Amino acid sequence: MLLVVSLSLLHSGCSPVMNRFISRMMERINAPIEPVKNKIANPLRPNIGLSVLWVGHATVLIQIHDKVFITDPAFTRTVGMLVRRSVEPGLDPSAITRLDYTLISHIHLDHFSYGSLDLLPKNATLFIPVGGAGYTPEFGFAKTHEMKPWEVFEEDSLRITAVPVQHFGGRYGFDISWCPNRGYTGYVIEYKGITVFFAGDTGYHPELFKEIGRRFRIDLALLPIAPVEPREFMQRVHADPKEAVQIFEDVGARIMIPMHYKPFNQGLEPGPAYAQELLERVIEEKGYRGRIQILDIGEQLVLIP
Amino acid sequence: MLYSFGMTRLVSPWYAFVVEPPARFTGSIELVATGQINTAKIGSSYFAGSFQLLGHIPLIERGEHLGLNLGVAQYYYGGSSPVYAVAGISTLFGIVHLNVKHSAQPTSWIGSLEIRLF
């Protein structure tokens, strides 16, 4: 009831674009959650070079040799109470029996889900962007590091570098002005000769990504491709599929896996498959089939056996 | 003034005047003092005030979805200073607080809907 009253108040006082977002959100509030068939029960493998399991949205379980990483874990039915999941998570969090590093790209509700972090093993190290500590509860992780752009964390021949991306700060909207130019980051993971770039959530910026490409030899880029519409509203902070492919080219990665689409209805896309269809068109145009791998939610890809 | 016991140790647990919402809803104790000057006398004075000591206990999603408020408040107006027990909930990212206050002597109830952004 309170939620409906609050949404109605928001609805009455917002810009036309925001009104359309809230209308879309309210239409889907009772929509069913699509199940994921054949979920992988044991995603961690004893002898592996590089594997990637897309859990959905920006949540990716990455294994590089003996190290296990998860990015922006989201396993809850809603993000931020209001935005409902349309597809269930592609992995049961209890299947993650070991975790070494949890990477949070920024503090928005769909990337920094308190309820989801509570479901994960606590022996991991948690990474948050600079400006995020004021939004970080004590989850009980072994260590927590707040990372500035270009800051490097090193441990056991592993290097994690926080790299700048183009997004925006805050968590609840009204707090954007408290942290306009901080609270968001990408990460580059380097371990045993394998380099993975996780962009989190970003708009396209030619200089930033070319600089990342100059500094690293990236094997795999995990890049956001949505929300797309309305483009004039999203463009500065969210790359569309064409811009994501441009980022892929700028950083010079060998392989790209798209993310940040599907399970949470974001933006004003005409349909849930919209971003993926746009990406498939760009892949055809540029001849990138094989280099850009589209995963299903819950699918695990072994890139380096 | 607020002491937060639910936040990472990377930040100070002490807050004054401005509180980032998670510091409150993840678990905290806050002391709020208010003073007011009325345009008409209440009893023999234009002045009134209150002290409130309130604990915020997280219930769902670290308190971001739902939290419990429990505490005591003392009001000063018109020569009286009743003590109230306070109980309520907070929701919607700690922004919306619904509280009920009860005083036994004199018997009185106060209900409040509070919007707290910081």
Image: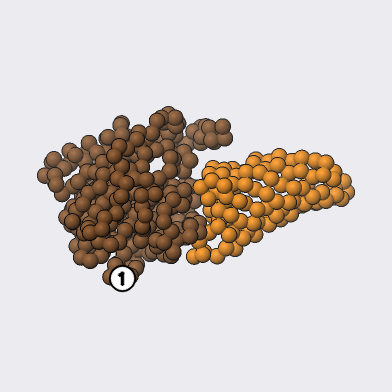
Write the residue at 43% across / 65% down: A143
Left/right of residue A226 with respect to residue A284 in the rendered view: right
Which amino acid is tagged 1?
Answer: Asp
Please name the color used to draw chain B: orange
Subunit ID for the residue under disc 1: A
In the rendered image, residue A74, in percent from the top left (x then y), is placed at: 39, 47
Task: State the scheme by which the image is colored.
Answer: by chain
Q: Taking A249 as reference, is A39 above or below it?
A: above
Q: Taking A59 as reference, is A9 above or below it?
A: above
Write the residue at 70% across / 54% down: B53
Left/right of residue A77 with respect to residue A287 in the rendered view: right
Element class at badge 1: loop
Front residue of A183 and A192: A192
Q: Quick check: can you spot residue A156?
A: yes
Write the residue at 23% across / 66% down: A192
Write the residue at 49% across / 33% down: A11
In the rendered image, residue B107, in percent from the top left (x then y), is placed at: 83, 41
Placement of the N terminus of chain B among the 4 image quadrants: bottom right
Residue placed furthest toward the right? B44
In the rendered image, residue A193, in percent from the top left (x then y), is placed at: 20, 65
The image quarter containing residue A194 is: bottom left
Q: Which residue is mark 1?
A: A156
The crowding category of the residue bearing disc 1, from other C-alpha atoms within 10 Å (few below 14, some 14 to 19, many at least 20), is few
Q: Quick check: can you spot residue A201?
A: no
Please name the color used to draw chain A: brown
Q: Taking A287 as reference, is A33 above or below it?
A: above
Left/right of residue A113 with respect to residue B101 in the rendered view: left
Total numbered labels: 1
